[in-house]
Image: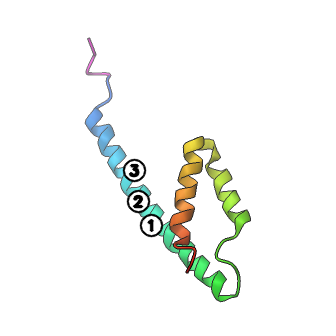
């Protein structure tokens, strides 16, 4: 039998997750916006849209999250650079 006085309130925890998700969405949207500005500025200056060393740094930053961290980093990088052909 579970003691409800010491069990975490699942509804409160779900609300916290909802708040965290909203914050993550806001931050991802801002990250994408900034990344696109950087890419456009780099291309306008005659550079490349992608800087591979920078992308490797981002991938390494997410490495502590395990294999899913690499996947998450790849998604963020892809979102930020937009279509590569443009």
Residue 75 part of the magenta-drawn span: no
Q: What is the magenta range?
A: 1-6
Q: Which residue is drawn at 66% across and 71% down?
A: 50
**Label 1 packing within 10 angstroms: few (<14), some (14-19), many (20+):** some
In-front residue for pair 17/50: 50
Q: Which of pointers 3 and 1 lies earlier in the amino acid sequence?
A: 3
Alpha carbons under labels 3 and 1: distance apart: 14 Å
In-front residue for pair 2/45: 45
Alpha carbons under labels 3 and 2: distance apart: 9 Å
Q: In which quarter of the image is residue 6?
A: top left
> Pointer 1: what residue?
29
> Pointer 3: what residue?
20
> Which mark, by number, is residue 61?
none
Q: Nearer the viewer, mark 3 or mark 2?
A: 2
> Pointer 2: what residue?
25
Q: Do the residues labelled 2 and 1 touch (CB within 8 Å)?
A: yes
Q: Which percent across, then down, holds residue 29?
A: 44, 66
Quarter of the image with the C terminus in it: bottom right
Q: Which percent across, then down, holds residue 35?
A: 56, 72
Alpha carbons under labels 2 and 1: distance apart: 6 Å
């Amino acid at each position: 039998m579970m003691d409800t006085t010491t069990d975490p309130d699942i509804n409160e925890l779900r609300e916290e997750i909802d708040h965290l998700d909203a914050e993550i969405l806001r931050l991802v949207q801002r990250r994408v916006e900034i990344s696109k500005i950087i890419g456009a500025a780099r291309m306008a200056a005659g550079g490349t849209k992608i800087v591979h060393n920078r992308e490797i740094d981002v991938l390494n930053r997410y490495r502590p999250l395990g294999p899913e961290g690499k996947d998450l980093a790849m998604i963020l990088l892809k979102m930020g650079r937009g279509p590569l052909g443009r």
